[in-house]
Amino acid sequence: MDEYAPGFSSSIIGYDMLTPPDLEREIGLTGGNIFHGAMGLDPLFLMRPVNEWSNYRTPVPGLYLCGSGAHPGGGVMGAPGRNAAQLVLHDLKRRS
């Protein structure tokens, strides 16, 4: 790193490294997975988190999914929340 940013190493005063077991224990992430579930092909798109809930709606009226466990997952920061919010607004307009 110092080759591209001279003095970088000397500017580090400490660090904290969390392994998946640490993340599960300290933050409560199941399996220590920061994406709230594997990001393989099977749980993506219409299957995230499960087929019936992939459109952000849950079986509970007025309850929507908007976290990392929803499409497109935790690697795209804010996208699940934005998508769910747009759906909520659409549903509210439809009720009016």
Image (tube, rainbow, N blue to C red):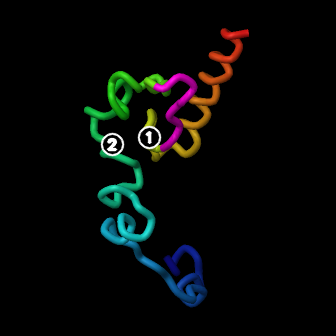
In the image, taking residue 57 as reference, residue 49 lies left or right, namely: left
According to the image, label 2 marks what residue?
39
- Helix, strand or loop status at disc 1: loop
The residue depicted at 65 percent of the width and 16 percent of the height is 90
Q: Name which quarter of the figure residue 96 lies in.
A: top right
Amino acid type shown at disc 1: Gly
Q: Is residue 14 magenta?
A: no
What are the residue bounds of the magenta stretch?
60-67
Query: Residue at coordinates 50% horizontally, 42% vertically from top-left?
Result: 67
* Coordinates of residue 77 in the picture (x, y in percent): 55, 45
Residue furthest front in the image: 60
What's the residue type where badge 2 is placed? Met
Q: Nearer the viewer, residue 16 or 13?
A: 16
Asked whether residue 65 is drawn in magenta, I would say yes
Image height of 65 relative to 25, above or below: above
Q: Position of residue 26 (x, y in %)?
A: 42, 70
